[in-house]
Amino acid sequence: MARGKPDTIVFTDGTLITPTLRVEGDLVVEGGRVREIRPSAAPTSPGDRLVDCRGLYVGPGLVDIHVHGGQGHDFVTDAPQEIIDGCEYHLSVGTTAIAPSALSVPIEQLRASIEATRHAAPDCRSHILGYHVEGMYLDQEYRGGHLEEYVRDPDPEEYLPLIANHGDFITEWTLAPELPGALDLIRACRNAGITTSAGHSQATYEQMMAAIDAGLRHATHLYCVMGGLRFEALRESPGKGYAPGVVETVLMHQALTAEVICDGFHLHPALIRFALQCKGPHRLALISDAMKGVGLPDGEYLIGGQDCLVEGGIAIIADRPEVIASSVTPLIGMLRFAHETVGLRLEDAWMMATLTPARIIGVDDRIGSLDPGKDADILLLDEDLKLQEVYAKGQRVAMYR
Ligand SMILES: [Zn+2]
Ligand SMILES: [Zn+2]
């Protein structure tokens, strides 16, 4: 029996953000993948589905590599449905690829969450890229929203079996490089193809350089709960005085990529512009770091064993009000803020929320841009960057116009 022609969708007359380029034209999708970009008004074939994109931006679906939950669903869970439901919320607001992330939790809970996410992945309409382990090997003093009792030094008896069983599914591991045993963990991750990231850390320049030598490649929520410039009066070598901390080392060292929370609460816009100046849009990603309260009204939420209060777009830990507890803004909100308020070029902001995070965890060969052959994850945004339509794996999954 002859196979029918695969479904073809032509997004016509839009402004395409690829995101490396901005071009006026048509985007052709066939069989769930991008086929080509061509001039508008090219002849279409009978049976092609046409989507009128006049006055709209057309670009790749967003890729969130650091996100803890959504619309009441927590990504620390042993229930695959909880993962699917949280990812569905993010999908509805334009995040077509996602790496559910854990806070510091007991190892059994972490293992159960990774397994639940693995089970959820084939049934999810968005791409589940794997699991991001944020914790438990963090600096106690810089633990931020993580619970004290779960934060500890790296223990190979604990992490080696986890990496042996699930290393292929762990996208990223956030750790503090200054902890005893951290370099062994970085090497174990590197050997398993896991991106290691410095976060919740007050490492010295020398400790950061040793970590980079061992394979450290990324920095988690740059600037936030991260040690900066250090006055080391008693340094012996190479001299006394001020020395770079984690922040400066990340900004200056091109071996490291980084990510920022761009919600208008965590970071002054000037800090984001400065990071972009240092790293460029191909080395600096936007992440949501959103927790389960995103997509829900203000209120109280239990996160990582702690009560959090959400009020007016910001989440804080109830009994430590000076600590911001991740965000309640989805990635599309970060993209909008980066362009409209921080003043980044739209192409740069879009790249930082798509191709760059995909590259950071090594999935840019199949998602993150409108290059031919990539999965057809596509957003249509109006001129105010409001979502109009969302496509994932070539299927329309949300429509707002
Ligand atoms: Zn964190
Ligand atoms: Zn986080």
Image (spheres, grey):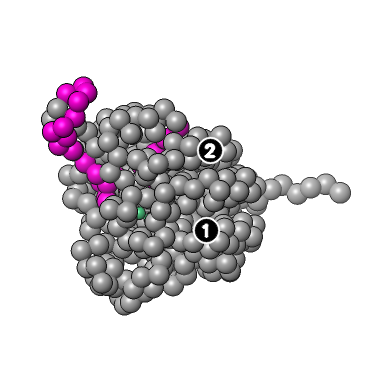
Magenta stretch: dominant secondary structure = loop
Amino acid type of the residue that numbered disc 2 sits on in the rendered structure: Ala
Q: Are marks 2 and 1 in contact (CB under 8 Å)?
A: no
Left or right: residue 369 compared with residue 211: right
Rendered location of residue 3, percent (x, y)? 79, 47
The stretch drawn in magenta includes residue 218: yes
- As displayed, is residue 299 above or below residue 92? below
Left or right: residue 189 compared with residue 310: right
Secondary structure under tag 1 reads: helix
Residue 4: give its label.
none
Q: Nearer the viewer, residue 144 or 383?
A: 144
The stretch drawn in magenta includes residue 323: no
Rendered location of residue 148, percent (x, y)? 35, 61
Q: Nearer the viewer, residue 344 or 257?
A: 257
From the image, tell me which residue sits under label 1. 107
Q: Earlier in the sequence, mark 2 or mark 1?
A: 1
Secondary structure under tag 2 reads: helix
Magenta stretch: give its range.
Answer: 215-239
The quadrant where residue 219 appears: top left
Q: Residues within 10 Å of mark 1 (few under 14, many from 20)?
A: some
From the image, tell me which residue sits under label 2. 188
Can residue 239 be seen? yes
- As displayed, is residue 382 above or below residue 372? below
Q: Nearer the viewer, residue 151 or 400?
A: 151
Residue at the limit of the structure toward the right, as seen here:
1
At horizontal 62% and vertical 45% (from top left) the residue drawn is: 164
The quadrant where residue 300 appears: bottom left
At horizontal 24% and vertical 67% (from top left) the residue drawn is: 320
Amino acid type of the residue that numbered disc 1 sits on in the rendered structure: Ile
At horizontal 53% and vertical 66% (from top left) the residue drawn is: 77
Rendered location of residue 390, percent (x, y)? 48, 58
Spatial CA span between label 2 and label 1: 17 Å
